[in-house]
Amino acid sequence: MPARIYITRPLPAGVAEHLREAGMEVEIYPKDQVIPQDVLLRAVEECDGLLCLLTDMIGREVLARAGRLRIIANYAVGYNNIDVEEATRRGIAVTNTPGVLTDATADLAWALLFAAARRVVEAERYLREGRFQGWGPQLFLGQEITGRTLGVVGLGRIGRAFASRASAFRMKILYNSLEADPEFEGAYPYGASRVDLDTLLQQSDFVSLHVPLTSETHHLIGRRELRLMRPHAVLINTARGPVVDEAALAQALREGWIWSAGLDVYENEPAVHPGLLALPNVVLLPHVGSATFATRLRMGLMAAGNLIAYFQGRRPPNLVNGGVWKNG
């Protein structure tokens, strides 16, 4: 009997076909929106594999209904939307899609950095509103980027890719990570040093966050940390929203503790703190870090590949909870 796979939202063309070509039955929730909880609960009762998104909360209630579910393939690098501990207790494999979105997310972090530092969104809106009356010597002055100090919090795949791009702008790098990376330090031409978080915040002109969401990183950047940053500093977050205390950030931007910020993720996504929405000195994007045609397809094919491997009796390449694997 073929494995039954349920996909919680339409994905790029080719993903479902890849699963069907491997002999699986595939059902897809047809609307391009977060799947309603009642629909999700019915779906998990009848599927062997679930391909879900970061916006799908797979907690105890869902897992308790998953009588035949054997694997959850998350369409994301992160998996904080899944109760992995409960899934493991029930013998359900959990996989993710690391690596394939590294460059796209690193590129977007740089787009946010430039937009926030040089007031790109403010200036574009100003022009569209018909307010542009010609060049002026003090019109939309922003922060210099070349030759400044870049602070990178988290030097994993995405953090490293982001940091490596800084060499084009001759930036010095300070990084905070669980472990030192002597290979990166040796290869980076303009100086890279591992420092504690407080030192990084105090000495960096730009700070970009690239850490996973854990109990230790929740509100990693709060009032105290924002107070440590320079008045001309720019904060970028393409990691996870709850890494930053949004209420504290809104106050910091409003009162001039820091210059500006660029965000692609939010503490209570899709809701955004109203204090941030009211400010001109923050660039807000709707979680599009991996949103390129090629990256989103690769993510889907990787998630499908994890499912195919599992149902063919092979260890999924991106298994998060390795303790559930009994065949290897």
Image (cartoon, rainbow, N blue to C red):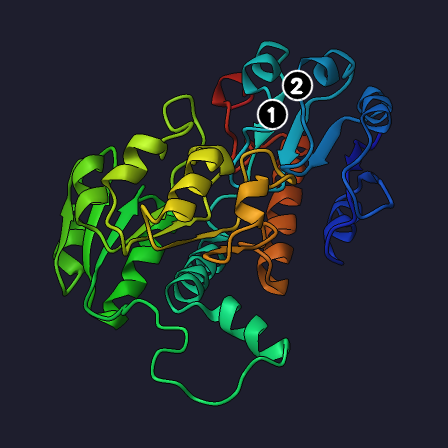
Q: Is residue 48 left or right of residue 215?
A: right
Quarter of the rendering containing residue 143: bottom left
Residue at figure coordinates x 72%, y 51% from the top left: 15
Where residue 290 appears, as percent x and y from the top left, is 55, 54
In what element is the residue under mark 2?
A: loop
Q: In front: 214, or 6? A: 214
In the image, is residue 113 above or below residue 53? below
In the rendered structure, which disc, 2 or 1, sits on the residue that comes first in sequence? 2
For badge 1, the amino acid type reads: Ile
Q: In front: 109, or 317? A: 109
Label 2 sits on residue: 59
Where residue 281 appears, as percent x and y from the top left, is 45, 57
For badge 2, the amino acid type reads: Gly
Label annotation for residue 47: none
In the image, is residue 119 above or below residue 68? below
In what element is the residue under mark 1?
A: loop
* Label 2 to label 1: alpha-carbon separation: 6 Å
Q: In front: 19, or 125? A: 125
Label 1 sits on residue: 82
Q: Is residue 34 visible?
A: yes
Residue at figure coordinates x 67%, y 38% from the top left: 53
Q: Residues within 10 Å of mark 1 (few under 14, many from 20)?
A: many
Answer whether labels 2 and 1 touch (C-beta < 8 Å): yes
